[in-house]
Amino acid sequence: MGPGDDCAVLPPCREELCVTTDAVVEGVHFSRPAFSLEDVGHKALAVNLSDLAAMGARPLWFTCAVAAPALSLAEARGLARGMGRLAAAHGCALVGGNFTRARELSVCITAAGAAPPGGALLRGGARAGDLLYVSGTLGEARKALDELAAGGRLPRGDRQRRPVPRVALGLLARRFATAGMDVSDGFAQDLGHLCRASAVAAEVEVGLLPRREAGLEAALSGGEDYELLLAVPPGRAAAFERACVRAGEQVSCVGHFSAGRGVRLRQGGRLLRARRGHDHFVDHRRGLPQTPAPRAST
Amino acid sequence: MGPGDDCAVLPPCREELCVTTDAVVEGVHFSRPAFSLEDVGHKALAVNLSDLAAMGARPLWFTCAVAAPALSLAEARGLARGMGRLAAAHGCALVGGNFTRARELSVCITAAGAAPPGGALLRGGARAGDLLYVSGTLGEARKALDELAAGGRLPRGDRQRRPVPRVALGLLARRFATAGMDVSDGFAQDLGHLCRASAVAAEVEVGLLPRREAGLEAALSGGEDYELLLAVPPGRAAAFERACVRAGEQVSCVGHFSAGRGVRLRQGGRLLRARRGHDHFVDHRRGLPQTPAPRAST
């Protein structure tokens, strides 16, 4: 039983339930008019599906709470369209929601996925000797943000407005990896979290970081990549890479885990300092095309 | 596995899962300094537990997404304390969360509870002839709001800042009632929703509405009561009332359901017009002590 009652009623589930919650807020995670409402809907769900992907969980359902100044019907439809297309692509059902007035637009989603008992991919499982893989490419969401700030226009489907949750890769990786997490706050910072949770160190060759046109700084600490970090034992690495090729999933081996603490970044063998990632209370968007002041509610 | 990973991981559940999401937003559901952060935390969880109560579901877990301008440690602790006390009282575990910067404070909670397969109390089950019960008292949250607007001070534990979710009553009522829902947008409006979902009409004697010092208008359409509306077949009414007395739950029979559509309010037999309830885009708080303008983030 979906939306319309006081609660959604969902059938009993034999698997473990992986649950995450994440909000996108105007002026922090998106700005208007650079983002259409369709972009906002897509991004709000994508960042949650990325957390499910990081656990190797199969998306099941989500709830969506929207807070907004008066929203036109066309805007509400755009929001639903962006969210709905991504949800349909992942077989994830909207089961409930809430709508409230607020001075700024925000979309808070809680998403749930299923993993076999004991099968979820945690941050804490990496062991010294495991290889470190990262999916896709890094730094593009940050590069797009910089382009917006400089007054540029983004191409359709850019990674800032249309992040791609690596759900299929997460499901595949669960068979090979000892640990996983997604990169939301920047590669270096999030890798640090994984190391702390696993009580290991990481050695990274930054020359191996997968990037297209983004600079090294953006790749290391840009944030909002929504790629996966995966720890894979060397004995399973070849089979993992073959499975990725067969599934059309791009992964790059960029280093390994070792005994100790912290993240050591090397460039051609030379040690670099670790960089900071995204801080939710520092405004990285200074200079962004500003969101107009919220209108009075009607 | 609770907070700290990309997702919480929850054990398989043999019962049906009832899931709800609800946000409280500064300037809409609370104002400062009339509300302490402890009040905000309590209210944010209470409105969600009330939805679980309306389904007759046993609270299991919740996630909490906070959006806020810079929050002091004392404020964050207050928020956690208000939420934590209520959660502990209902055996409901915080399993995950999110924190993001925003211009105004809002707390978005998703809560889940368990009900036996087929056992959740829906809005659509009321039948003509069923008696209409309402729990507790109506109109006090609105009365408290009016007192705040007039510059008054509220007593400790008032129903505006400290709504009481009727969780135990919902669990009890599941054994007797054919339908249930909670009163969040006003008695008359929410009863209308229940009637539509059940395709029945309701006949209410307003003189029977349980209220303490609140006026009739506040009881009919004040909103934020978080009491339960319950439809109980006449043949089970006596047993239901006895069970409520034993459990110390106050309920009042205020009318019955009949064939037809809509809500008919009578006062000593004379027909009154139905009243409007809460509209999320109309500012009922005009005249409330205003929330200070959001501070710049630091």
Image (cartoon, coloured by chain):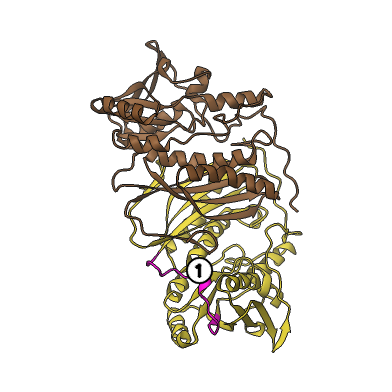
Chain colours: A brown, B yellow
Residue A237 vertical position relative to residue A70 in the rendered view, above or below? above
Furthest-left residue in this view: A235
Give how far across and how far down residue A105 sits, in percent: 64, 45
* Residue B72 seen in the figure: no
- Closer to the camera in the image, B153 or A104: A104
Kindly identify the residue that appears in the image at 52 percent across and 43 percent down.
A45
Residue A48 placement, left or right of A40:
left
* Residue A58 seen in the figure: yes
Residue A192 placement, left or right of A234:
right
Kindly identify the residue that appears in the image at 67 percent across and 38 percent down.
B296
Give how far across and how far down residue B212 sits, in percent: 63, 78
Q: Amino acid at mark 1?
A: Ala
The stretch drawn in magenta includes residue B127: yes
The stretch drawn in magenta includes residue A229: no
Identify the residue under disc 1.
B54
Kindly identify the residue that appears in the image at 64 percent across and 76 percent down.
B261
